Amino acid sequence: MLAAAGQGRPYRGSWAAAGLGIILFLAGLAGAALGPPGLRWQLGTAGCFLGAFLFVVLGPRGAGLEGTGLPRQFYRTLDGLLGDLKLEGHGIYIAAGTQPGLRADRVFVPEGHEVTNLTATLDEATFVYGGPKGGVALDPPGRALLDAHEERIGARIGHAPLGELPVLLQDLSDGERLLKELSLRRSGDTIAARYRPGRYGVLCRQMQEDHPQLSRQLGCPTCSAIVLAVARATGRPVRIVSVGERQDEITLSLEVLP
Amino acid sequence: MRSEEVLGLAMAVWTSLLLLVVPAGSADVFVILLLIGLLVARALVGPYAAAGTNVRVDAFIALGLVVFAVFVVRRVYDVLTT
């Protein structure tokens, strides 16, 4: 799933399932018209329902969302893990190469809300427990999306001016367009980001409902891609202050750290 | 096997089973049992499926509930007019 997104290929689902769905639907219609008198309704209903179900759920568009970050089960597991470890700090996105020895993008979830020092050893999924440096460093959920997007547009976001990010990210997609009307406003070290989610904006809203803590710590895959893009563009760690929704817009408040 | 494939396979098996078990002429019973199967499958597989898949399955459930409501209204009407 992530590999497909990382290679810039939207996950397309199964054309075979879509074809089978169409055949079953037509068979259902035929059954309703030509079947034994007592069974026509049942044959028609069964065929049409199953055909439509397979086409919609398993067909190309139905499966297109699997490449959007990670499935819900992952977030349930991660939410449980961070809760069990009592890591309550908001995620800090760090772009590769912006910290000594850091070769990959990371999101650091600290133990507390005050982070005095980012640990230097963040390359692997580092877990440092206890003290002011406690926390866990993870692969950002939106990294694969952002990498695939950079490959698609043929441009690197690293060190791009912040004002250009809305243009660079406007076609962020995973088979389906993920956001519209992204705006970024910087005031000192605070950045306010807003965007209208694409057709499947339900992902962000569902995450805010199902996992509010995780939503603040990591953000949904689209939010994660945006925050990581800001981290790459500014070359500095970026902390998520808040994630919310207002009038069909997803709002992010970010803090650029020294 | 992806969760969506499990869902599709489960509904295919359940629909086939209903075709064999439900007596001929009981289309309303067939539809209601189909809806119940879909609700159970959604409850079991939903947490593991992508959000967009759940949205699509919910659309089928909504349609099934509308059909169920029609059956209920029709049955109530029959009872009241006899």
Image (cartoon, grey):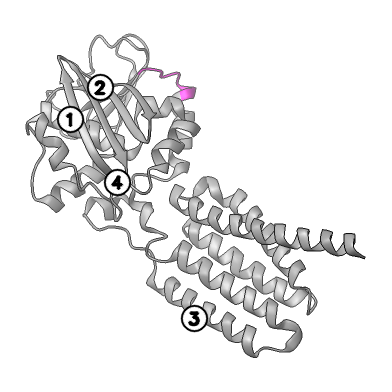
Disc 3 crowd, CA 10 A, few/some/many (<14, 14-19, 20+): some
**Which residue position is annotated with label 2?**
A254
Disc 4 residue type (three-letter): Leu
Quadrant of the rendered image containing residue A213: top left
The reply to whether residue A168 is in sight is yes
- Gap between marks 3 and 4 measured at Cα: 32 Å
Mark 3 residue type: Ile
* Residue B14 within the segment the image draws in magenta: no
The chain ID associated with circle 2 is A
Q: Mark 1: which amino acid?
A: Val
Earlier in the chain: of badge 4 and badge 2, it is: 4
Which quarter of the picture shows residue A47? bottom right
Task: Identify the subunit bearing mark 4.
Answer: A
Above or below, comparing residue B46 to residue B9 in the picture: above
**Cα distance between the residues tagged 4 and 2:** 20 Å
Please indicate whether residue A37 sits to the left or right of residue A101 in the image: right
Residue located beneath label 4 in the image: A178
Query: At which x and y percent is residue B16?
Result: 66, 74
Magenta span: A83-89
Query: Is A85 contained in the magenta span?
Result: yes
Helix, strand or loop at label 4? It is loop
Task: Mark 1: give few (<14), some (14-19) or many (20+) Cα within 10 Å.
Answer: many
